[in-house]
Amino acid sequence: MRKELQPWLRLFLFSLLTLSLSWTSAFPGETLPTYALVNCRIVPVTGPPIEKGVIIIRDGLIESIGKIGMIKIPEDADLIEAEGLTAYPGLILAHTTIFLEAPRAERAGAQPEAEESQAAEKPALGPEIEAFKLLKPKKTTIDAFHRLGVTTVVVAPESGIFAGQSVLLNLNGDQASTMVVKNPVALHIHLVTQRGAYPSSLMGTMAFLRQSFLDAAHYAAHRSRFNKLQKGLKRPAYDPFLEALIPYVVDKKPVVIHCANQEDIRRALRLREEFKLNALLSGATEAWRVSDALKKARVPLLVSLHFEPPLSSEYTQKGEEEKKKAEKEIYPANANHLYQAGIPFALTSFGLTDTNAILKNVRAAIQSGLPAEEALRAMTIVPARFLGVEPILGSLEPGKVANVILTRGEIFAEKTETEKVFVDGILFPIEKKAAAAAAPATLNLAGTWNVTVRSAMGEMAGTVELEQEGNEVRGFMASEMGRWEIEAGSLSGNEFTFTISATIMGQAMEMAFTGRAEKDSFQGTISTPMGNAELRATRIPRQGN
């Protein structure tokens, strides 16, 4: 029989959920605060910088912007003194794979044994897959992107020839529904092969893509004729795969083709021309090698900041030393070559697994010759234009969405820090990270622990299971409230911190623990939206100890 939650615990859950939702769902229908950012240097991107400027943010939008003394400060505005800070539009990453849950069970490689033979006869089909339905936003990830100044991302499924449809998000909380700016954005295609199945060669992949596009056009024409006439025509059989392709093949909605090397770019350009696709090319780290063809095609490029040479590269084939040299000296110059050739491009993080490498690699591109102002355009107004959202995003202008970042220093300078972030007009202060490196771990917290959580609402008991590698700690906490993941754990000397990813009444939220650890105990404070709670834990001895 299911154990009933104690009355205080039900009240705690309801209060916590209500307060959490008030943070994650500031709209629709809710008036947002008015802010006046004063005395900041403003870089609008679409106009010259403004020294000693003012930005008025009202109800999620930029109301006015200009020199101090020329803009009236509203009486109802919260005044933010920004002297010494620079205001930029929030950065846009036009191709990422963040927040995605594990692929669905029916995707390639997950079929039951009874279906293996059937699955081997055809490639995994996924144009109907929607990234939005796979999203599981996490506050820790959002915080990491805010520190970089990133406020907007395109999230795309990452595997399969037809990977699926992407979604454009503003990072304004941890609830997917309030983050959506545009859905779907594009159909994403990867020029890859199928292991142990058709197509097992790139020639086969290209043939499969061409046949799929032809079939979609024929299917759409047949369906259209039937819908108009019906009588005297055989009803077409419903095909969900072809139905999902029609908006992109027939209606010419955007298609993003990932290109791992220069040959992929040539293949993608041929597909685009043959079927008149509204195509963007992503990856494109070897775009400089085919710049003449790209200049002629005038195709939008989403250029990856992942500088590792592809397997087909001559530098990879010459050995590890040449590969590393190319990664540091040759591939970072790709963006500058495109700029010099007059080819528009956006910079993306696709392929990078470390968020800290994003700005580091932007700096590498700048050091390789790309002007810093062009790097900024490639992460603001250019991707906004490519994605069809230039009227609302990508620059600081009256009427646009208030995605504003305040930095201390030039945005791409190595020691610059992001001080504040506004997304959809919602203020997200940036917590300062400790400057010192973590002290070597002298404790091993791996094992099982009895834990007690006390708050003004009462007491809850449970267990914690921890794993540890160096300073990194992860695990889970189990109680009558469920099983919660422990992530981003860090042990520096005796200082112990981690994040609890909890699902309460169907809503995901995160809570932060800060405390001290000893060999057989740890204790500290859990910060929640409704206040703090005290956590104490004691180690459960292993049998035989």
Image (tube, helix red, strand yellow):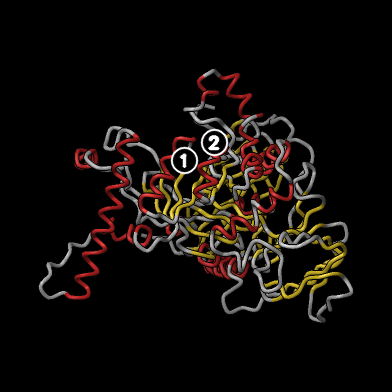
**Disc number for residue 286:** 2
Q: Is residue 528 above or below residue 106?
A: below
Q: What residue sits 63% from the left and 64% below the top?
A: 393
Q: Hey, what amino acid is under mark 1?
A: Ile
The image shows residue 418 at horizontal and vertical percentages of 75, 53
Q: Quadrant of residue 223?
A: bottom left
Q: Residues within 10 Å of mark 2 (few under 14, many from 20)?
A: many
Residue bearing the label numbered 1: 265
Q: Nearer the viewer, residue 137 or 303?
A: 303
- N-terminal-most mark, 2 or 1: 1
Left or right of 290 in this view: 115: left
Residue 66 place in picture, x, y as percent? 81, 70
Q: Which of 109/207 is in front?
A: 207
Residue furthest out toward the bottom: 75
Numbered tag placed on residue 447 in the rendering: none
| Disc 2 secondary structure class | loop
Q: Are marks 2 and 1 in contact (CB under 8 Å)?
A: yes
Regarding mark 1 in the picture, which secondary structure is present there?
Answer: helix
Q: What residue sits 53% from the left and 18% below the top?
A: 318
Vertical comparison of 307 with 165: above or below: above
Q: Is residue 426 visible?
A: yes
Instruction: Kindly tell me whether residue 535 is visible in this rendering.
Output: no
Q: Residue at x 69, y 31 (%)?
A: 441
Query: Is 260 left, or right, of 409 in this rendering?
Result: left
Image coordinates of residue 122 in percent, x first then y, are 24, 42
Alpha carbon of mark 2 to alpha carbon of mark 1: how far?
A: 8 Å
Percent position (x, y) of residue 176? Answer: 51, 62
Name the amino acid type tagged 2.
Glu
